[in-house]
Amino acid sequence: MSEKAQIDVCFSPFLYPVYEKEGQIVVVIDVLRATSAICTAFQHGVEKMIPVATVEEALVYKQQGYLVGAERNAIAIEGFDFGNSPYSYMTDKIKGQTVVITTTNGTQAIEAAKNAHAVVIGSFLNISALCDWLLKENKSILLLCSGWKNKFNLEDTLFAGAVAEILSKHQAFDILDGALATKYLYQQAHQNPYKFLNYSSHKERLSAMGLKDDIKYCLTLNQTNVIPVLQGKYLVLK
């Protein structure tokens, strides 16, 4: 009898080597805001995205004529086309284009997991489509939280719990302790995630910058059915 697929949570890209396993699907999570921005870009017609870890790499692509989104410490970097706000990708300008993106946390997590069996982008915006796909794949899943500069954050953990909550209703998976903990956390927060995150550090950071609309949008369920996956250096639609 074969072992059941497992669901686990890694709370920081720094810890990824501890959780890395052959054949697993890695769901990269950066709710506020990189993975939400990526899902939004695909919803609005981008053909491919190239996630890069450094601003220097992004600049090389910019000089080659690519559209580029670049952000550090929640601030869009001057001279690039976009920042990290989902709203900046709600434009016809990106339709059919390949867009490069670098962010403080999310693209670092993608870089850490790039050699996994599969890397998929997760956000509240695509949670139902994502979970349906994960169920069909029936492989072990690692929910990789981008965190904040390799430290734990609450919003990515909350999303991991939402996924664990949905998938645990099926008998296809063994839910390991990290996923179980996040599931219990989400059960406390699910009626009002925005309020639950009221004093979380990154929510306060973005709120102080006048980005409350970004926060509310990124915590909204099922705005899209897109499932961005990593193929080579590109994010493309599954």
Image (tube, rainbow, N blue to C red):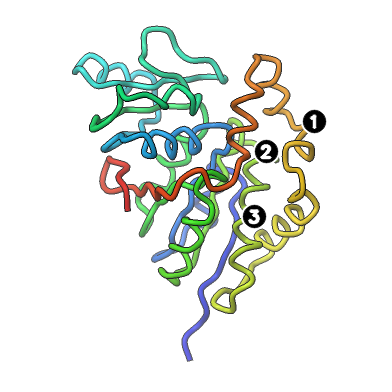
Nearer the camera: disc 1 or disc 2: 1
Kindly identify the amino acid type of the residue bearing the numbered disc 3.
Answer: Ala
Kindly identify the amino acid type of the residue bearing the numbered disc 2.
Answer: Asn
Task: Please determine whether, in this image, residue 168 is positioned above or below residue 219.
Answer: below
Which residue occupies the foreground of this view, 18 or 131? 131
On the image, numbered disc 3 is attached to which residue?
Answer: 162
Circles 3 and 1: CB atoms closer than 8 Å: no
Image-based side of 143 in relation to 54, left or right: right
| Labels 3 and 1: the sequence-earlier one | 3
Circles 1 and 2: CB atoms closer than 8 Å: no
Which residue occupies the foreground of this view, 202 or 39? 39
Residue at 40 percent across and 64 percent down: it is 22
Image-based side of 3 in relation to 156, left or right: left
Residue at 39 percent across and 22 percent down: it is 69
Residue at 73 percent across and 28 percent down: it is 201
x and y, in percent, of residue 21 in the image: 45, 62
x and y, in percent, of residue 89 in the image: 41, 26
Determine the CA span between mark 3 and mark 1: 19 Å
Which residue occupies the foreground of this view, 94 or 112? 94
Determine the CA span between mark 2 and mark 3: 15 Å
Residue at 54 percent across and 38 percent down: it is 30
On the image, numbered disc 1 is attached to which residue?
Answer: 199
